[in-house]
Amino acid sequence: MRAAPACISAQSLRYRWPGQAADCLNCVQMEIRAGERVFLHGASGAGKSTLLGLVAGVLVPSAGELLVMGQSLAALSGPQRDVFRADHMGILFQQFNLIPYLPVLDNVLLPCRFSRRRLSRCTQPADPVQDARRLLDHLEIGVELHGRAASQLSVGQQQRVAAARALIGRPELVIADEPTSALDAARQSAFLDLLARECGESGATLLFVSHDLRLQAHFDRVVSL
Amino acid sequence: MSFLARLALASALNRRWTLGLTLAAVALSVALLLGVERLREGARTGFVQSVSGTDLIVGPRTGGVQLLLYSVFRIGNATNNISWVSAQVLGQHPAVAWTIPVSLGDTHRSFPVLGTTEAYFTHFRHGDQRALSLAQGRPFAGLFEVVLGSEVARALGYQLGQGITLSHGASELSLAAEALTQAAEHGDKPFTVVGILAPTGTPVDRTLHVTLESMSALHLDWQGGAPLPGLKIPAEFVRKFDLAPKDVNAVLVGLKNRSDVFRMQRFVNEFRGEPLLGILPGVTLDELWGLLAVAERALKAISALVVAVGLAGLVAVVLAGLNERRRELAILRSVGARPGDIFALLMVEGVLVIGLGVVLGVVLLAAVFTAVTPWAQTQFGLALGGTMGGTLPAAAEWPLIAAVFAAGTLASAVPAWRAYRLSLADGLTPRV
Ligand SMILES: Nc1ncnc2c1ncn2[C@@H]1O[C@H](COP(=O)(O)OP(=O)(O)OP(=O)(O)O)[C@@H](O)[C@H]1O
Ligand SMILES: [Mg+2]
């Protein structure tokens, strides 16, 4: 069987925060293949969020090489990186992922507003709402919640809506920065199952960050920082 | 509507209370700015039109402004006179259509008394060529009859048929001092109110009008500003004397042909009988208004400052709200919004508040002026017509409105720029 192409590849990657004396990330080597579900583990302050910022193209490496889907992000301009991120990545935060005053459906559709590619990759580009409803349904958000303001959902519901938003328009890469830390153990597990299943279904690579090693069972591979 | 605009609108609605208050502040400051401007313009027009239709004011050789001040505004003492003969020569000049003699000096409860002729009621014009009209009664016809300006009647509560006494000199009389200066009262010759004028919004409202003959009759037994000792001429005997005036303080002149005004002015200034001065009231009124330009400018500066405060409030509110919105901005960045989009988002919000504020301010002002105009008309005779009563801003106000809008847009760029910087620095993880 031929190995899948690399989704993320980091060579001697370094990053130092402006004004800081020491490197935050020091010579990171990492290779993640397309379709893999990877658990990125590290102690608090190890630089996990920083690494995700680099992968998302919000931060620029101080040295070394970082390729995402074969593209060197450092070679792109700021606005080009913004477009690249919107086109190819879905992002999940630890908490407060939604725009509070927008309804659930509008929150899910946000990436389609900023990225043509995400819109065109919906099953029906003329009507992305269909995909949004299907994803919400898969993530067990009832129809009665679709029109409700995001601020009126429970934390667990909010995280599932955020997952639907990360997945809409089938981005190649889903990045999640401790999206389950606000949930109890049972809900964490259920959420991870859902997320992993949906990523598998759309063929997305999943890069999941946590300091909680108990969650690693849901993933193909563990990478430590 | 573009998605960003809709997003900005939804976000603004989410913070409608704080933004609403800011909006009210902007609207009020805009209304104030335009209102002050309109009042200023109205006051100027009212002032400059205190007298209209009069081509020339002729008086003794004093300053032009001084002549205007006492002949039109009854301010200051008319110390010099021109002889009645000169006044009559003027009236018979072939270029002259009419003359109104003006004789001052007496007061009633600190309101000035004006001695004049019937010509005053037929020829005097103010505002937009408006003639005087009587609210009640008739013009004076004979001795010891008085016609009141509207303000005099209102302030003192005088009715038709009422008897009043005049006092000599323009000195203010407090109630206590009144007893002491009894000597300076024309108490022996009471007047009857025969008419009350409609409001004009000019000094006419504060004036009591009597005939020149009444004026002479009052002073038959006076000399040099005091009653002649031992001489008392009772009212019933004054008719036996020659009551023709000996002099007047000024003459308002109307010409048959306006184009003769400069020729007539030269005639007056080179008058052979005695030294005279002729002024064009419009020119001197403008000159006088120019003296008030400082106050006018101060008023303008204050209302401009109020607008600045309103805009500063807007900037402060949006800036303060920005910290709570860092998360929101980070989310937008994570779904692909560019820093430029964030900047645009904040700009849309600022411009929205400014735009609505300006519109609301204009509407508010129109409502206030519509409500107040009829009242101002009857109470002060203020001719608020034209620009002031209009619901739409006058042509002269558009640049002011545009300036406020431009300043507001510029001010909105401050929080927008800050949000742009934050979204660049924060990346995906907003810091508190
Ligand atoms: N904006 C910043 N400026 C300067 N230093 C920063 C900044 N953000 C993070 N750091 C530093 O970089 C290091 C790594 O931070 P990072 O947020 O990547 O850690 P993390 O692994 O995500 O930790 P956690 O598990 O607690 O989220 C920390 O030592 C932190 O102090
Ligand atoms: Mg972190």
Image (cartoon, coloured by chain):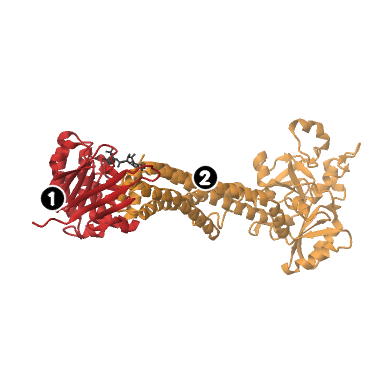
Chain colours: A red, B orange
Query: In the image, residue A26 lies at what x, y percent?
Result: 30, 45
Q: Which residue is mark 2?
A: B309
On the rendered structure, is B59 left or right of B12? right
Q: Would you say A184 lies left or right of B103 here?
A: left
Image coordinates for residue B253, horizontal then vertical, percent: 76, 60
The answer to whether residue B137 of the structure is visible from this angle is no
Q: Split into 4 quadrants, where in the image is the C terminus of chain B?
A: top left
Check disc 2 and give the amino acid type: Val
Residue at x 19% of width, y 51% of height: A32
Q: Are marks 2 and 1 in contact (CB under 8 Å)?
A: no
The answer to whether residue B362 is above or below residue B175 is below
Quadrant the N terminus of chain B occupies: bottom left
Label 2 Cα crowd, 10 Å radius (few <14 / some 14-19 / many 20+): some
Query: Is residue A206 in sight in this rendering?
Result: yes
Instruction: Give the SS element for disc 2.
Output: helix
**In the visual, does B364 lie left or right of B83?**
left
Which chain's residue wears label 1?
A
Identify the chain of the residue marked 2, using the numbered disc in the image. Answer: B
Residue B240 disc label: none
Quickly name the residue at label 1: A200
Q: Amino acid at mark 1?
A: Gly
Could you give the CA–CA distance between mark 2 and mark 1, rounded to whole angstroms? 57 Å
Spot occupied by residue A103 in the image (x, y as percentages of width and height): 25, 47
Q: Residue at the location (52% across, 58% down)?
A: B398
Query: Outermost residue toward the left?
Result: A1
